[in-house]
Amino acid sequence: MKRKNPYLGADQHTQRAKAQGYPARSVFKLREIDERVRLLRVGQRVVDLGAAPGSWTLWAAERVGPQGSVLAIDLKELSLALAPHVTAVRGDALELGSELLVRHGPFDVVLSDMAPSTSGNKLRDQALSAELFSRALEVGREHGAPGSAFVAKLFMSGDFPALRRAVGEVYAQVKTIRAEATRPNSSEVFVVGMAHR
Ligand SMILES: C[S@@+](CC[C@H](N)C(=O)[O-])C[C@H]1O[C@@H](n2cnc3c(N)ncnc32)[C@H](O)[C@@H]1O
């Protein structure tokens, strides 16, 4: 009898991610950024905003190891088995009070893969993405340790130059990365800040 392929219909990156134990293709984006800028190290404290379904959280948890910690936050629940050094919180990053962040921080790395559910209205989606990006930067500014790093997703728009400049006010080095695993029709980029001032 022919066995049904569970990944049938999924694209190649998604199939590869699942075969390696990650729930989403986005793991390859973080892996690429990690390799390009030497982002994650053993023992670091990480906050992962927009963490569901959990690929970035799993990758970060493996890289920082049990000596480090990962605080994962999303509107949706993470339905994965997580290591003891990972704390998953269901919540809205835009509304989050500072108590949780103070308890788990200061962070060596602030990650945000947050994205609005796309509405088809390009301007609206870009504006929401800019809002989520700005919130991630606020978390980095207020809860990032000296010398820490920042990676956040942003849908490309006319706001991009101002938002990139804003990252430069908090971090000494700024890079924009378009990850290879990004879908060709997507306008997303990742803005990376290194060396929190
Ligand atoms: C592209 S997915 C993240 C994928 C994740 N990095 C991974 O590797 O599995 C974007 C996530 O952003 C979350 N999100 C959007 N707005 C948010 C908000 N205001 N607060 C928290 N999470 C949010 C969505 O619920 C969604 O799960």
Image: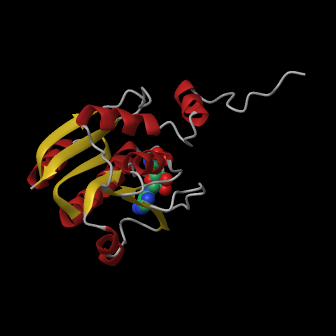
Q: Residue at x 12, y 55 (%)?
A: 170
Q: Residue at x 32, y 78 (%)?
A: 99
Residue 65 % position (x, y)? 40, 51
* Image quarter of the C terminus: bottom left
Task: Please indicate, yes or no, whether residue 115 appears anywhere in the rendered image.
Answer: no
Residue 82 % position (x, y)? 54, 57
**193 up-or-down from 134: above or below:** above
**Quadrant location of residue 154?**
top left
Judged from this view, the residue extending furthest toward the front is: 67
Q: Residue at x 30, y 46 (%)?
A: 41
Who is closer to the viewer here, 29 or 44? Answer: 44
Judged from this view, the residue extending furthest toward the right is: 1
Task: Please indicate, yes or no, whether residue 155 appears anywhere in the rendered image.
Answer: yes
Who is closer to the viewer here, 167 or 45? Answer: 45
Who is closer to the viewer here, 62 or 161? Answer: 62
On the rendered structure, is 90 left or right of 144?
right
